[in-house]
Structure formats: C-alpha cells, structure tokens
Amino acid sequence: MKLSLSEPEDDVEPTFWADIRGEAPWDALTLWTMVVAGVMLILDTPEWAYLGLVGGGVYLYFAGRGILTRLTMQRRDFRVGAPLNVRLGYALLAVWGAMAVITIVAAIVALPTS
C-alpha cells in the first residue's frame, strides 16, 4: 500500500481485502518459478522449459483468477478499488496472462523430443 500497489483497506470490501491479503503469501511462494525459468533461459540451460511450464501455469492461473474475481465482485456491487486502479489492475493481469501463454508455448517447443 505504501507504494500504491494495492488499494487502501477502506476503499474495498472486507471480503476482497481478506482475499487479496490471504493470497499474497501463496503468491510469494509460487511466483518465483517464472523468474528462475527466465534466468535459466538467459543462461541457456535446457531445463528452463520445465520451470517455464510450471511458472507459466502459475502466472496464467494468477491472471485468470485475478480478472474473474474482480469481474464477479464488481457485478455483485463489491467495492474492489478506484476505477482507474481497477482498469490498471485488469491491464497488468492481462499482461501476466499473455506472458504466461507465450512462456508455455515457448517451453513446449523447447522440450526435448527424445
């Protein structure tokens, strides 16, 4: 919140606040996989593809869940943040989803065939 990366607690529904706060520790435990896959790719380590598949799957899940949760809550008139921040959130989640799909496809192509 200090960096304005999340909404102030008073601007969102308590349910949404609890959901994103509960998700944060899990994200910290899983989102490293894509970063490590990227480093391995730069270092030309063939095993990057396996972490790319895992990381891509995690990022795709993260993006899809984030978008659909916000859409569902908005349709039910939950406050999920200021309109500008919500639009920015959708855009960033879409970027994460695109990165995930690109990584998954590249990892499948890079997998050993024999």
Image (cartoon, grey):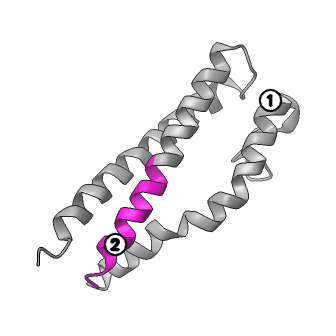
Nearest to the observer: residue 72 or residue 87: 72
**Main SS category, magenta section:** helix
Residue ID at (80%, 38%): 17
Task: Say above or below: 2 vs 110.
Answer: above
Check the picture and name the quadrant holding the C terminus: bottom left
Residue type pointed to by label 1: Val
SS state under label 2: helix
Residue ID at (28%, 53%): 102
Task: Say above or below: 22 vs 36.
Answer: above
Residue ID at (30%, 81%): 47
User: Disc count in the image?
Assistant: 2
Residue segment shown in magenta? 45-60
Check disc 1 and report the residue beneath it: 12
SS state under label 1: loop
Residue type pointed to by label 2: Tyr
Q: Quadrant of residue 30?
A: bottom right
Was residue 55 drawn as part of the magenta stretch in this picture? Answer: yes
Check disc 2 and report the residue beneath it: 50
- Circle 1 packing at 10 Å, graded few (<14), some (14-19), many (20+), is some
Was residue 32 drawn as part of the magenta stretch in this picture? Answer: no
Q: Please provide percent x and percent y for residue 70.
A: 62, 29
Q: Quadrant of residue 103?
A: bottom left
Disc 2 and disc 1: Cα gap in Å?
38 Å
Task: Say above or below: 93 vs 84.
Answer: below
Q: Please provide percent x and percent y for residue 94.
A: 44, 39
The residue mark sitting in front, 2 or 1, is 2
Question: Residue extending furthest front?
Answer: 114
- Circle 2 packing at 10 Å, graded few (<14), some (14-19), many (20+), is some
